[in-house]
Amino acid sequence: KNEVEQSPQNLTAQEGEFITINCSYSVGISALHWLQQHPGGGIVSLFMLSSGKKKHGRLIATINIQEKHSSLHITASHPRDSAVYICAVRSLMNYGGSQGNLIFGKGTKLSVKP
Amino acid sequence: DGGITQSPKYLFRKEGQNVTLSCEQNLNHDAMYWYRQDPGQGLRLIYYSQIVNDFQKGDIAEGYSVSREKKESFPLTVTSAQKNPTAFYLCASTKSKNTGELFFGEGSRLTVL
């Protein structure tokens, strides 16, 4: 079982729809990151959060530490939102040879049709 | 503008050759990381460096080597010992190790012919 699970794997939406991407994790964490990977491959950090909720423009990220779950919402989706969205958690335990290294989900591929 | 620059963007290599991927940052970050991305998998850590002249192995360091002679630079060498080197490689940085916002480069796609 992967320590970080994202759902859905793939998502197709019509322009204007409200979108939710989910991330569940099984380890204790100090922070959770939401990242956006463009078709060219570059990755941009959207949010870093350890509790509650953050909003930036049409994007909202929430986290429930007790439930070990986070959601990324996109309101009024647009074709330019088409990308792969990646959830990553900063583990409190040793991972990848060191405490505090990131564990990445496999990503959710979003396609927004005009 | 501050950021991370990776080069080359695309690289083709024959089996048995070593190749070096460049990663330069002007963010004044202490910590730098190299990740490998394969289709259908999450990013996996190859090496990381917390400070100049120091680096540590990640999950999948076998067949790779790095150096950190300058704060700004963290090149990755994919050696001939790496059995399956065809992948997308991403360099990242944070202000200090394992804290703060992540900054990524645009990636380098290596194909072994």
Image (tube, rainbow, N blue to C red):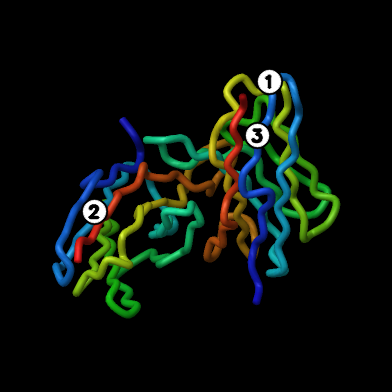
Element marked by disc 1: loop
Q: Quadrant of residue A34?
A: bottom left
| Circle 1: residue type | Glu
| Circle 2: residue type | Asn
Check the image and report above or below for B47 versus B28. above
Tell me the mark number nearer the camera, choosing from 2 and 3. 3
* Left or right: A112, with B100 as reference point: left
Q: Are marks 2 and 3 on the same chain?
A: no
Q: Which disc, if any, is residue B12?
A: 3
* Left or right: B61, with A58 as reference point: right
Q: Are marks 1 and 3 in contact (CB under 8 Å)?
A: no
Q: Quadrant of residue A65?
A: bottom left
Q: Nearer the viewer, residue B76 or A92?
A: B76
Q: Which residue is mark 1?
A: B15
Disc 1: host chain:
B
Tell me the mark number nearer the camera, choosing from 2 and 1. 1
